[in-house]
Image (spheres, helix red, strand yellow):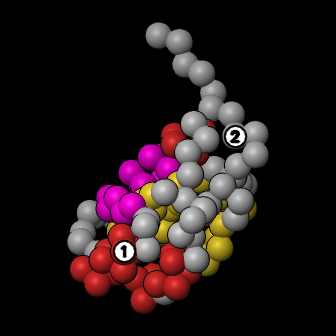
Amino acid sequence: MQLNEIQFSDATPIDGYGPGFFRIGGQAMMGHVICTRAVAKPWGGYDDVQALLDLAGDVDVIFVGTGDEVSHIPTELRTTLETAGLGVEVMNSPAACRTYNILLSEGRRVAAALITTS
């Protein structure tokens, strides 16, 4: 088997995560975060809908990481995002990080909205 290192020429990948933090582009960020190709910033969680709506037109899908376990996001949040033209994929935060990085390396228009793990 041959393994190839993923190259992120113009994007910032999620390097790692742990209890209460994410490491993005070599920088540790405490708390929940939103990541896009261009920026990583703090996120207020499910009540911070506007931060996600601001991504409409720039991304096609948002991977919502729900922490350690997969759980449903609020129905109203999903409906609001989908009405704005954003695809929503829900998974636990570790899976959301991995999926985001893979699609980011392919040049896809993706974002990750991540709840910290414990």
> Is residue 88 within the magenta segment?
yes
Say which residue appears at 70% left-offset and 49% top-offset: 11
- Label 1 sits on a secondary structure element that is helix
Indicate which label's residue lies in the foreground, 2 or 1.
1
Where on the picture, by quarter, is residue 108?
top right
Residue 51 location in percent, x, y? 55, 80
Residue at the disc numbered 2: 8
Circle 1 residue: 83
Give the residue displayed 65% in from the left and 73% down from the top: 41
In this view, the residue in front, 86 or 99, is 86
Residue 75, position as x, y percentages in the image: 24, 80
Examine the image and state in which quarter residue 36 appears.
bottom right
Which residues, given as a range, are shown in magenta? Answer: 87-100
Circle 1 residues within 10 Å: few <14, some 14–19, many ≥20: few
Using the image, determine if residue 56 lies above or below residue 103: below
Picture coordinates of residue 28, whole percent (x, y)? 67, 65
Please provide percent x and percent y for residue 96: 42, 55
Q: Left or right: where does residue 40 sit relative to residue 56?
A: right
What crowding class fits label 2: few (fewer than 14 Cα within 10 Å), some (14-19), or many (20 or more)? some
* In the depicted structure, whether residue 8 falls above or below residue 53: above
> Would residue 76 appear left or right of 67 to someone viewing this image?
left
Q: Is residue 118 visible?
A: no
Determine whether the residue tagged by mark 2 lies in a helix, strand or loop.
loop
